[in-house]
């Protein structure tokens, strides 16, 4: 395994979870912020749609992590219907940190204190490689749609508007 001592603590936790999940892509630290899909795409020289935005919602009193393509927004009403939930709304920054152990803008698909129910946007399948957050707003890792579904145990759904 590569020396990860240069990474922030949260990113080292994510890197360990990736290794445990059999993921070959490694967490990399970017000099510029990757807090938004547009920032991440610019820093990586890729299309904004290839960025897996990690958005935490609150769905019927439980956290819900949605990994959505940066090319569109999540339609929360449609997502609630698809999941059979009465309501899906944005989580507060405190709820995000409690559910994931990570701050908004750097939430990784895994490496959380406990498993978080996850939905993976089928639009990410349009890209041979996607980039997901690595636990901080400056860290990311390369992956694929299929790998995201596998490592999160997520449901592949249409989430965009």
Image (tube, helix red, strand yellow):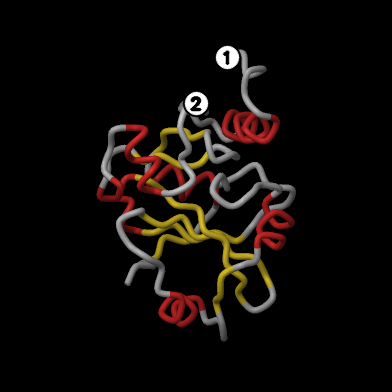
Q: Give neighbour class at mark 1: few <14, some 14-19, many 20+ (Cα, 10 Å).
A: few
Residue under numbered circle 1 = 2
Residue 121, percent across and down? 39, 59
Vertical comparison of 122 with 78: above or below = above
Q: Secondary structure at mark 2?
A: strand
Residue 157, percent across and down? 39, 65
Residue 116, percent across and down? 64, 57
Quadrant where the C terminus sits is bottom left
Task: Select label 2 or label 1 by which is in front.
Answer: 2
In the image shown, does 86 or 103 lie closer to the viewer?
103
Residue name at image x 52 percent, y 28 percent: 27
Residue name at image x 54 percent, y 48 percent: 105
Residue under numbered circle 2 = 28
Q: CA distance from mark 2 to mark 1?
A: 11 Å
Residue name at image x 70 percent, y 63 percent: 95
Q: Give neighbour class at mark 2: few <14, some 14-19, many 20+ (Cα, 10 Å).
A: some
Residue 127, percent across and down? 27, 44
């Amino acid at each position: 395994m590569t020396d990860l001592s240069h990474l922030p603590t949260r990113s080292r936790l994510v890197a360990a979870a990736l290794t445990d999940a059999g993921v070959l892509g490694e967490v990399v630290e970017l000099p510029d912020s990757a807090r938004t899909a547009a920032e991440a795409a610019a820093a990586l020289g890729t299309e904004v749609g290839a960025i897996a935005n990690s958005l935490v919602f609150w769905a019927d009193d439980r956290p819900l992590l949605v990994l959505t393509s940066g090319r569109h927004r999540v339609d929360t009403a449609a997502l609630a219907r698809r999941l059979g939930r009465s309501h899906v709304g944005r989580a507060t920054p405190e709820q995000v940190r409690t559910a994931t152990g990570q701050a908004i803008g750097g939430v990784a698909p895994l490496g959380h204190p406990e498993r978080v129910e996850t939905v993976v946007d089928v639009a990410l399948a349009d890209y041979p490689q996607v980039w997901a957050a690595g636990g901080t707003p400056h860290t990311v890792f390369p992956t694929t749609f299929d790998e995201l579904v596998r490592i999160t145990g997520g449901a592949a759904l249409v989430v965009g508007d």
